[in-house]
Image: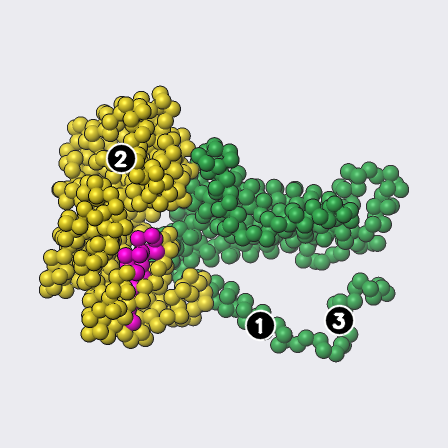
Amino acid sequence: MESNRGRSTGSTGTAFSRRWVLGAGASALLTTGLSACGSGEGSGGGGDTVTAFVYGDDAVKVQTAAVARFNKSAAAKSTKGKVKLEKIPGSDYSAKLRTAMGSPSAPDVFFNWGGGSIKAYQEADKIVDLTDIIENDPVLKNGFLPSVLAAGDLKGRHYGIPMRGMQPVILFYNKTVFAEQKLQPPTTWDQLLDINTKLKKAKITSFALGGSDLWPELMWLEYLVDRIGGPEVFRRIQDGDAEGWGDPAMLKAAEMVKQLVDDDAFGSKFTSVSYVNGGAPAVFAKGKAAMHLMGSWEYSTQLGKFPDFAKSSLGWAAFPKIEDGTGDVRNVVGNPTNYWSINPRTQNKDAAIAFLKDCASEAYAKDLVALGDVPTTSNAAALLSSAPNPEYATFQYDLVQQAPAFTLSWDQALGDELGTKMHTEIGKLFTGKSSPSEFVSACKGLK
Amino acid sequence: MSSTVTSGGGRAGKIRAGRPGAVWALPAVLFFTFFAVVPMALAFYLSFTKWDGLGDPKPVGLANWQKLLDDPRLTQSLGITVLLTVASWAFQTVVALLLGVWAAGRQRNRAVLSAIFFVPFLLSSTAISILFYALLDPNFGIIQKDTLGSSSGAFLAIVFVGGWQFIPFHTLIYQGGARQIPQVLYQAAAIDGAGRYRQFFSITLPQLRHTITTSTVLIVVGSLTYFETVLILTKGGPGTDTAILPYLMYEAGFKTYDFGYASAIASALVLAATGLSLVLIRLSGFGGMRSTREGM
């Protein structure tokens, strides 16, 4: 690291260094959001305290409990480290982490989505390669499902420890509406189109969709492309070949999206409905829409907002098969989980690693299960019977366990820069501002 | 010019005890330097670099400025920004001018109503945007139409919400301006037989010339830097149809982490806004400070 830093200062010559820019503009716009963490002793002069940045949603209880447990543990004593948790409100997380990592008050340990979301950090030497540490530590090596551990990799190297539940994308349906309309959840695409026709006659929207957030629209493309052409199609794009967007499966998927939009499968107002502000979940729970393609967190969202609906009417199914598609119907897309990673500039790496090991513990997995999440630890299966809804937890666990491929959400896999531009193009496809072929050629040009 | 009642303030050559020295300006100068000049200079410097926020900024010469000229989204964004500025100006000026002149009357009901009209300006624009976002919700709002999902609907919503927030402020400016107009002008006009409309167009409007310039500059510069309403109401959508320049800058900086390009957009905005204000002031003769009461 030291030599690396020396090199980069040399190569920029007379240019101002990052530190100069941030130092001179310490009060400038870039850092205004950081007051929350500016007062603490960051990794710069912190000594023993390990600061951890975490995405501050409802699930953060589990990390709070883990920190309390760790700070009282023997591991904390032997490494002379205490962990301090900084909860960053969700929608600001990525931008705040990014600005903090370039400042003297950077965290020692930070939450991320693996894959593309950490690529820039890896390139800037802001993240510790954990591959050898995991290999040499039986607790970490055997503690997690290998597919989940690998899903956050960059070029076959591990940079993160799984620390939250699995988040596959699931086709949720409203059991009450389905019973009233005498319908069964679709297992093939033709059935899905048929259901749409029937629901349209009954003046019910088939699918809730938070179109204004864009990423819920992405979930449709992810599954369609996987079912039509298999996980290889996106894998090629993820590996940096933009020509991969030209795969026939991509065009076919975009055409199917257009067909759904034209058939009013998402209703006529989806472009201004948001998932984040609760619009799409409410449309679904109130029976205005019969189905909702969403990450597994939909269950806990509904449990929070519409508990009666979540307990009695919420059903779930795998994404249907597409007749002449080559993708395995057991494949899953979504976020395998979230990860903890370590900042190389930490003053107490031993304590940070010891803290990460707690994620493999049974106590940690139990906390996740109690919250309704399905842990990605090897010991999870045995704990699921104590979940708030064991049936749902087991469905999720089996779905992921049996999946031949788990494709990471495209936006997370591609990283912020490409992901944001791809979101824009997907938004244009869904609103009809670009045709399926225009969508494909626009995506080929993304860089 | 013998009157000392109204023009005592700025006479040169008259030495007074306790007149503030340059030191008095220091807090304001320091504040402006650290919170405006330094960040602006840094942004200008960053516009010649490539920086993702993690490593050190790397000089790339004019690459970001070249990209600024070549980016098709920027061309679209510029068009939307100009359209938004013109629409906001037309909407806010007409309503605020009429309201302000009306509120200048000394009747008690006008005083009470003006105070109520001023309330929207006291709310934060984020709060206002969240409020209207909820009101415009397509399924649970009051209109229940896909307002924000159509290009024209989203654009008009932004113009309306901006107007709702800022018209009270401009009303206040016009109210102050209209109250400065000497009553004697109206009395003379009334004797000459001019009706209320004639009085408005021949006395009120010309007398408010400088007020209109002030308000226009504020609206134009404000529209060029309008941001949070777009972020909360439309996120630049549907598609990219309401992505004005400040939103494009935000997206480049805090979504794609291309701080170099974001800084280039920011610098271009500062230059454009400053240039536009100067042109407006020059064209309107505001800079010459010619009194509207010449010859009285």
Q: With respect to residue B106, does A436 lie above or below? A: above
Q: Spot the green chain and give its letter.
A: B
Task: Tell me the element at label 3.
Answer: loop
Instruction: Please tell me which of labels 3 and 1 falls first in the chain.
Output: 3
Q: Residues within 10 Å of mark 3 (few under 14, many from 20)?
A: few
**Which labelled disc corresponds to residue B12?**
3
* Residue type at tag 2: Gly
Name the residue carrying label 1: B27
> Left of A235 or right of it: where is A307?
right
* Residue type at tag 3: Ala
Q: Residue furthest bottom?
A: B17
- Which of the colour schemes (rainbow, by chain, secondary structure, one colour) is used? by chain
Q: Colour of chain A?
A: yellow
Q: What residue span does the magenta drawing correspond to?
A: A49-64
Q: Nearer the viewer, residue B40 or B106?
A: B106
Number of numbered labels in the structure image: 3
Task: Tell me the element at label 2.
Answer: strand
Q: With respect to residue B115, does A128 lie above or below? A: below
Q: Percent position (x, y) of residue A437?
A: 29, 33
Q: Percent position (x, y) of residue A327?
A: 16, 35
> Left of B151 or right of it: where is A148?
left
